Amino acid sequence: MRAVNKQYRLINEVIHGASARFRWMTVLDWNSYARNHPSWFASDSIHLSAAGAVQLAVFVHRRLKSLGLTGPLRS
């Protein structure tokens, strides 16, 4: 989650803690990846803009592909 407030930072900590307990769990760090891209978010800094939605999909797809879980990205 994008850590724009304390609640979301705590949720991210719980998610990372769970990934340490469950080795089958993979965490994608969208917070770090999207940090320098404010245009990917609406004015509330949480919800995605259209560009952000595309970038989130690309981010997830690339990670799934690196794990061998999907085919090539199509434009």
Image: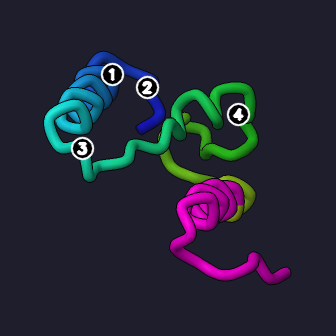
Secondary structure category for the residue under label 3: loop
**Any part of residue 41 in sight:** yes
Q: Position of residue 35 (x, y in %)?
A: 64, 27
Report the residue marked by disc 4: 38
Report the residue marked by disc 1: 9
Q: Residue at x 62, y 66 (%)?
A: 65
Whole-Å distance between the Cαs marked 1 and 3? 22 Å
Give the residues in magenta: 55-75
Look at discs 3 and 2 and give the one toward the viewer: 3
Report the residue marked by disc 2: 3
Secondary structure category for the residue under label 1: helix
Q: Are marks 1 and 3 in contact (CB under 8 Å)?
A: no
Whole-Å distance between the Cαs marked 4 and 2? 13 Å
Whole-Å distance between the Cαs marked 1 and 2? 5 Å
Q: Is residue 40 above or below residue 35?
A: below
Q: Residue at x 74, y 34 (%)?
A: 37
Whole-Å distance between the Cαs marked 3 and 2? 24 Å
Report the residue marked by disc 3: 23
Secondary structure category for the residue under label 2: loop
Is 29 positioned to the left or the right of 27 in the image?
right
